[in-house]
Image (cartoon, grey):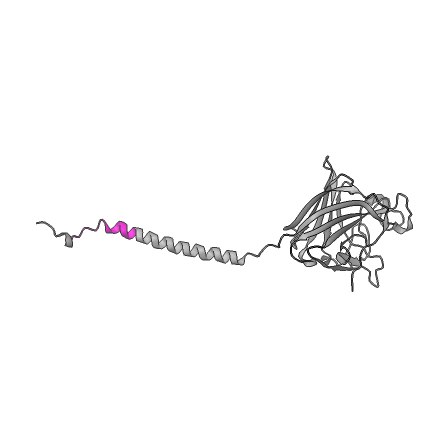
Amino acid sequence: MQRNPQFSNDTNGIVPAVGIILMLIITIILAAVIGISAFDITDKLKEPPEQIGFEKAEVLLGAEHREWGGSGSGPEKGDIDLIYLDYLHGPKVKGDEIGSIIIRWTNSSGKGGELRFINPNYFDEETQQKDHNQNVGKFCTGEFSAGDRLVIRMAHNQWQSGGDTDRENVGFRYVESGSNQIDVVGKYPFFGVGETEEVNNPRFPVDFEGDRPMKAGDNVEITFLGPDHYFVISKITTTAKEYTGKAKEDSKLECQS
């Protein structure tokens, strides 16, 4: 007897179709789950700090000076090296948004050093220093905007005899000093230190490592790091050169009360 094709019990074609439909459903569910998870992860990620851009950097060695402890203009005189940075574009930058600023310099032989300015909010009047067993004074931070010029001030000594630095153990290097500061030129300190009733000789503690202070011809790299001291917000390089004008007295800006 011939079967009526309308009432056939042959299910060989149904099973593959059901399998394909199930696979499609599973794929759609997985895609939805993965999509939701991806959106959730993206939503939790914090936006990194916006990059800031400097138009140029200029390093002037020995541009200013200070007489250490009345030691005169002999080999005991300490120089203040300056780095100028012109802020070209970007948002207003507040002191709390910068964790540290690192200055590195090397010559063609790889010799050089590193100086790190830490955000003053990490310090207090009792902050201890490597080379000076003194209270450091009060600290302050400021802000800078596009169009501003920054100056990084770095004081080093050469066989300081009239001050407090240990001459034999410290030698010719950058030291903790009240002259160490980062100013917004003509306005106020960005990273600064000031006097208190108890401390009339404030010092900004900097962290120096390396073979020597900067020398003319060194390649200099200035890096701004975020509050985590890891994320690079800005980096610029230049070449150090000697200041050829007449030395000036210390002229850093004062922290406001």
- Quadrant of residue 136 in the image? bottom right
The image position of residue 152, as x and y in percent, is: 76, 51
* Quadrant containing the C terminus in the rendered view: bottom right
Query: Residue at point 38% right, 55% down?
Result: 28
The image position of residue 240, as x and y in percent, is: 76, 42
Query: Residue at point 43% right, 56% down?
Result: 33
- Quadrant of residue 140 in the image? bottom right
14 falls in the magenta region: yes
**Residue 231 located left or right of residue 141:** left
Query: Residue at point 24% right, 51% down?
Result: 14
Q: What are the residue bounds of the magenta stretch?
A: 8-19
Residue in the foreground of this view, choosing between 206 and 165: 206
108 falls in the magenta region: no
Residue in the foreground of this view, choosing between 108 and 87: 87
Residue in the foreground of this view, choosing between 181 and 135: 181
Identity of the residue furthest to the top in this view: 109
**Residue 236 located left or right of residue 134:** left
The image position of residue 39, as x and y in percent, is: 48, 57
The image position of residue 227, as x and y in percent, is: 66, 55
